[in-house]
Amino acid sequence: MTIGDLLRQYRINQNKTLQEFAGNIIDRSYYGKVERNIHQISAENLINLLRYNQIDAIEFIETLDPNYENYQSQIQIQRKIMEEAYYQVDKDKLKKVKLMITESKLSEKDKEIQNLIADGLLELLNPDKPNQKIRDEIKKKIFEIPNFNSTKFMLYCNSMRFYSLADNEAIVRKIIEKY
């Protein structure tokens, strides 16, 4: 099923015309071509359309991709195991999670983020023998993540001690200004 097919289904279920469903978000004619899979819709317009028509975005995505929920669950399970290992000061368990991540079916980007979290937690468990190379790599990678989302915020908070006081002040100022 395509995005256009699914949007058409929702529109028909809501007994709306193309114009009623598209509202002022996108042109009716363009929207009709999206439904017919002639044109693609931007993520921003799709989200706005879903909100406008009171359609849950997660439900929409899960309908498009039945594996979405399982994929997100896999990420959350890995993070929970990492957190437990960190709080139990179990470095071996953290290393096993890294292997689990590598063997998982996550995208390369998600594997990179999951491994970044694991590396950060492992480094936090080594306060007496800091590995500056790993710390610098973690600091660099955190700010390569676009947008300051919850994952980036969590990574930053867990690795605050890798930054100088002046760096932390500047970062926190930027976060406060933005949010």
Image (cartoon, rainbow, N blue to C red):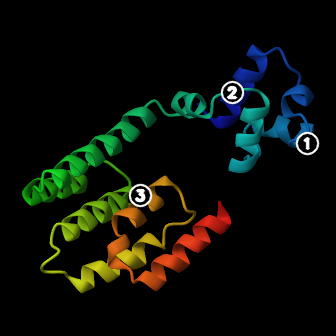
135 or 100, which is in the foreground? 135
The residue that mark 1 highlights is 27
Mark closer to the chain start, 3 or 2: 2
Quadrant in the picture for the C terminus: bottom right
The quarter of the picture where residue 95 lies is bottom left
Q: Residue at x 17, y 66 (%)?
A: 125
How far apart are the two marked residues, 1 and 2, measured between alpha carbons?
Answer: 19 Å
The residue that mark 3 highlights is 154
Q: Residue at x 40, y 40 (%)?
A: 72
Name the kind of residue labelled 1 in the image. Answer: Asp
Name the kind of residue labelled 2 in the image. Answer: Ile
Q: Residues within 10 Å of mark 3 (few under 14, many from 20)?
A: some
The image shows residue 127 at horizontal and vertical percentages of 17, 74
The residue that mark 2 highlights is 55
The quarter of the picture where residue 18 lies is top right
In the displayed structure, 11 sits above or below 175; it is above
- Could you tell whether 52 is left or right of 145 in the image? right
